[in-house]
Image (cartoon, grey):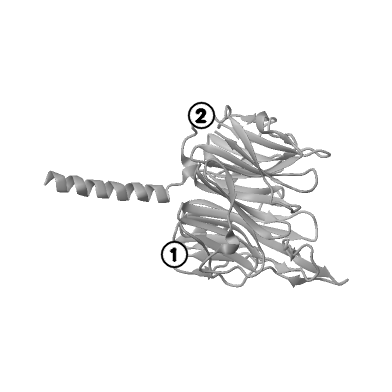
Amino acid sequence: MKRIFLFFLLIVSAFFLVHICCERDFSTLPMKKNPRELSWSIDTLAYPGYNQTAMDDIWGSSATNVYVVGHNSDIGGKMYHFDGKRWADVKLSAMQGGNIVGAFQLAAIYGFGPGDIWAVGDYDRLNPNPPPYYIEHYSLVIHYNGKEWQQIKTPEGLAIHFDGSQWNVVNVPKESELFSVWGSSPDDIWMGGLDGTLFHFDGTSVKKDSVPVSISEEVYRDYFFSEITGISSDEVYMLLTAWGNSSVPRRYLLGRQADSWVVVDSTFFPELGLLWMSPSGTLYTAGWDNVYKRQGNSWIDIADETLKRSISVGDIGGTDDNNIFVVGASGFEVNYGEAYHYNGVNWYHLEDVRIANASFNDVEVIDGEVFIVGTTTSGFPEKTLILHGK
């Protein structure tokens, strides 16, 4: 009887451990050492023979299973994988179960474990007069005819999914390009993009959703969901950015309440374009020279003079409210990739990772280690820099 019980206990324990492995957010694991005393290494990614290899977003289920996605100048979307020792090109063109027609770009990646990963972006179109072989899509292609702005072409969104053995194209509505993806669980995933494009995956299929914001194209010709973050299906937030004919955008913070989206705030400073929610449920936003945290219905400035050094923040992330990293760029004639750490009391400049002629785009704490993604800015070929602190 004891042997049967022990066998049953082992089976249950194994199932529990697998469940935790697949569902746990590894960004919440504690740091392995003082985050201000990390040892840093740098890897350079450059696709041979091309002018630009620019990775933008990173995610990993552990420090030995990390993915980064972005753009390559002539062949479109790229993805690399890190196994704890080296970065290798992920051959997405050899996908089975779904074919990407033509070239594509990838803007964001998010997952729930080594066998459940999502990436989003858009398709590119062939250039009839190469090189380059493919024409990039920026936010929107528009034309001014002397009286009004007219949209010429809106890119087509792309979503792909990794099931542990292969990447497959996901059937999504033929809408605009996608910029962001986040989910509370494998059957609750949000994807946002250009023209207010918003999709939801419920575990079975992807369906279009909408938000209670009316955007006038006469005033705001370019609007998109740039950020999605949260900690559960009931605590999800999105940032909708709307650009008009002026250089000052308007931003809407939307939150999920009672199975619908509501406008939580539309008083953002225009330079604040990033969102991150800590495991405690505290919402943070960042941008040029500033980092704010939401307290009640107000935003509290937590940046100090250490941080306010004309840094354009590229990303914010961490493990908790006392372990936050921001990365970005400073400088004018020469750009410097910059990184700062916040311990809940003060900011600390990580001088060991300050790099000339570079800009940092993303930061993630994965399995207690820090990964920073950036690009070189001193001409072509433009390369990707990945800094790894442990």
Q: Quadrant of residue 311?
A: top right
Mark 1 lies on a secondary structure that is loop
Q: Which mark is residue 322?
A: none
- Identify which residue is drawn at 62% across, 41% down: 372
State if disc 2 and disc 1 touch (CB < 8 Å): no
Name the outermost residue toward the front.
49
Mark 2 lies on a secondary structure that is loop
- Comparing labels 1 and 2, the label whose residue is closer to the camera: 2
Amino acid type at image mark 2: Lys
Give the x, y percent position of residue 194.
66, 63
Q: Counting other residues with Cα less than 10 Å from the Cα at mark 2, is it few (<14), some (14-19), or many (20 or more)?
A: few
Label 1: which residue? Answer: 203
From the viewer's perspective, is residue 380 above or below residue 210? above
From the viewer's perspective, is residue 109 above or below residue 280? below
Q: Earlier in the sequence, mark 1 or mark 2?
A: 2
- Identify which residue is drawn at 45% across, 65% down: 202
Residue at mark 1 to residue at mark 2: CA–CA distance: 38 Å
Q: Is residue 117 visible?
A: yes
Q: Is residue 187 left or right of residue 168?
A: left
Q: Which mark is residue 33?
A: 2
- Identify which residue is drawn at 68% across, 68% down: 155
Give the x, y percent position of residue 146.
88, 71
Give the x, y percent position of residue 106.
63, 58
Give the x, y percent position of residue 58.
58, 48
From the viewer's perspective, is residue 342 above or below residue 233? above
Amino acid type at image mark 1: Gly
Q: Is residue 32 left or right of residue 315?
A: left
